[in-house]
Amino acid sequence: MCRVLEESATSKALRQTFGKFATGVAVVTARDHQRRLIGMTINSFCSISLNPALVSWCVNRAALSYMDFANCTDFTITVLAANQREIADRFARRGGNKFEGITDDGVGSPAIAGGCAVFCCDSYNRILLGDHMMLIGKVNHFEQYNREPLIFTQGELVEYVRTNESFRRASGLCAG
Ligand SMILES: Cc1cc2nc3c(=O)[nH]c(=O)nc-3n(C[C@H](O)[C@H](O)[C@H](O)COP(=O)(O)O)c2cc1C
């Protein structure tokens, strides 16, 4: 009993310590074998390679959609913008219909409108790592938009602010 408590305290501390590393926030969408939409909020997105264009993210094996993501042939990652907290919260919920109001043309998996960037990927590889599976995608299409990203750090969603730029402007260091 004590051992279990000890382990869970260690995991909590490790999770908090991981949280010192600030990340962006994304929503990954795909289709299950019946072509139903699946999606979840992630912060494990990582760019891997330019040539070929590869990205990765990790899915928790305890997620309801784990098996569906593990078997999907393609997925779409939308990097969320600073004003998309509601979307981040909605797609972080366990199960349920997360796609109300999301435009879906029925082809591939939908990007979330209003994001900072979109990566459409074909599944390239998957690696079981501890309690997660790493999914590697080959990017077949990408787009970026002129919006600031949503940030996740220390268990909180926060807005990105260009303090250096505003500081420079405020203190007159930027001529013209
Ligand atoms: C900011 C944030 C980042 C997250 N990152 C991940 C992640 O990278 N991988 C993951 O499996 N779950 C991640 N989650 C948790 C999932 O979004 C959450 O477990 C979701 O309920 C899974 O959906 P499902 O159980 O309906 O499949 C994250 C949640 C938040 C709020």
Image (cartoon, rainbow, N blue to C red):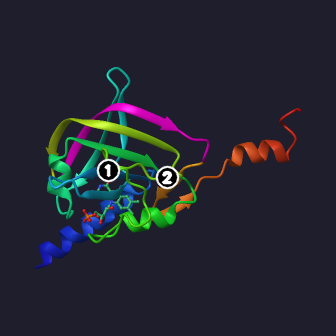
Q: Residue 14: x percent and y percent?
A: 31, 60
Callout 1 amino acid: Gly
Callout 2 amino acid: Ala
> Which residue corresponds to the image point at 43% horizontal and 48% vertical from the top-left?
78
Quarter of the rendering occupied by the N terminus: bottom left
User: Mark 1 sits on what residue?
Assistant: 106
Cα gap from disc 1 to disc 2, whole angstroms? 15 Å
Quarter of the rendering occupied by the C terminus: top right
User: Mark 2 sits on what residue?
Assistant: 113
Q: Which residues are magenta?
A: 131-147
Report whether 50 appears left or right of 59.
Answer: right
- The residue closer to the viewer here, 134 or 143, is 143
Q: Residue 134: x percent and y percent?
A: 22, 44
Q: What secondary structure is found at the residue carrying circle 2?
A: loop
Report whether 16 appears left or right of 85.
Answer: left
> Viewer-nearest of labels 1 and 2?
1
Q: How many marks?
A: 2
